């Protein structure tokens, strides 16, 4: 069971927004990795190389986006294509807007484990009853993305996938970071509660410490995936 994380940054500025001392995409990549997501793909323009620098040393692929005029659905499809080209066995993706910087590794792990018990379901974390992000989408439902208008925003796109037949399952994970974005400082977040019961029916050890630990590996740049119109037309 392989679940990729697709981090969507609408601009280099959104990718590099300060998130408690780390660029937004770096904090998300670290949480995704600590939670067990692989591969991790960041979809962002990077004209000055600053996004790549922010991801140095992280196990991430930085993917050049599809043309902006194609809209958010094309960027989601772009990230999924890159993930599946890296790991053919990828069977679901976490769609993760870059503004949601405070999602904990525990939430990633819970979504992946729940996917193991509900492989055909679209999984959406909730906090206080409100639906949040990242949303886990089985790869069998990704073909819907290719036919959506460019003006559909991420929340609309998830609704479209559900309307096309995906079975939605909402999972209360007690993580305020799934709903509250980077505009609220980390220090001002409500307390993390966590799921009352193990979402997948058993208890596991969390990887939260890994997201806040310094990266002691070599500061190599992320893998890069240039956009290829020919490749995109083949999907």
Image (tube, rainbow, N blue to C red):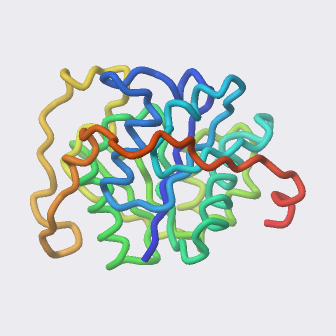
Q: Is residue 171 above or below residue 28?
A: below
Q: Quadrant of residue 70?
A: top right
Depth order, front residue of 115/207? 207
Residue visible at 50% across and 38% down in the picture: 56
Q: Quarter-wise, where is residue 142 in the image? A: bottom right
Give the total of numbered labels: 0
Of 144 and 235, the residue lying toward us: 235
Above-or-below relation of 180 to 21:
below
| Relative side of 207 to 221, left or right | left
Query: Please, which residue is most extreme toward the front here?
Result: 218
Q: Residue at x 37, y 72 (%)?
A: 115
Q: Residue 40 appears at what percent x and percent y?
A: 50, 54
For the N terminus, the quadrant is bottom left
Residue at x-position 18% and y-position 48%: 174
Question: At which x and y percent is residue 148?
Answer: 73, 52
Q: Measuring from the top left, give residue 100's x and y in whole percent.
A: 40, 36
User: Quadrant of the image for the C terminus?
Assistant: bottom right
Residue 17 in the image: x percent, y percent?
46, 22
Q: Residue furthest right?
A: 230
Please report the residue visible at 69 percent of the width from the left and 66 percent of the height from the top.
143
């Amino acid at each position: 069971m392989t679940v990729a994380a697709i981090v969507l940054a609408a601009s280099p500025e959104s990718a590099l927004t300060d998130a408690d001392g780390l660029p937004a995409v770096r904090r998300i990549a670290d949480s995704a990795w600590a939670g067990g997501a692989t591969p991790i793909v960041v979809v962002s323009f990077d004209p000055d190389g600053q996004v790549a620098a922010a991801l140095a040393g992280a196990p991430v692929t930085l993917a050049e986006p599809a043309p902006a005029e194609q809209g958010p659905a094309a960027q989601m499809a772009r990230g999924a294509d890159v993930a599946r080209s890296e790991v053919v066995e990828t069977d679901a993706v976490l769609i993760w807007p870059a503004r949601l910087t405070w999602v904990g590794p525990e939430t990633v792990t819970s979504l992946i484990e729940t996917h193991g018990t509900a492989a055909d379901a679209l999984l959406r974390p909730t906090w206080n009853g409100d639906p949040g992000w990242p949303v886990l989408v089985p790869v069998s439902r990704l073909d819907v993305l290719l036919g959506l208008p460019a003006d559909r925003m991420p929340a609309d796109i998830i609704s479209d996938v559900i309307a096309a037949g995906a079975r939605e399952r909402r999972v209360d994970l007690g993580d305020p970071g799934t709903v509250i974005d980077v505009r609220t400082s980390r220090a001002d977040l409500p307390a993390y509660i966590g799921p009352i019961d193990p979402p997948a029916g058993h208890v596991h050890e969390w990887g939260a410490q890994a997201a806040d630990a310094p990266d002691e590996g070599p500061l190599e740049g992320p893998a890069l995936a240039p956009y290829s119109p020919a490749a995109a037309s083949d999907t």
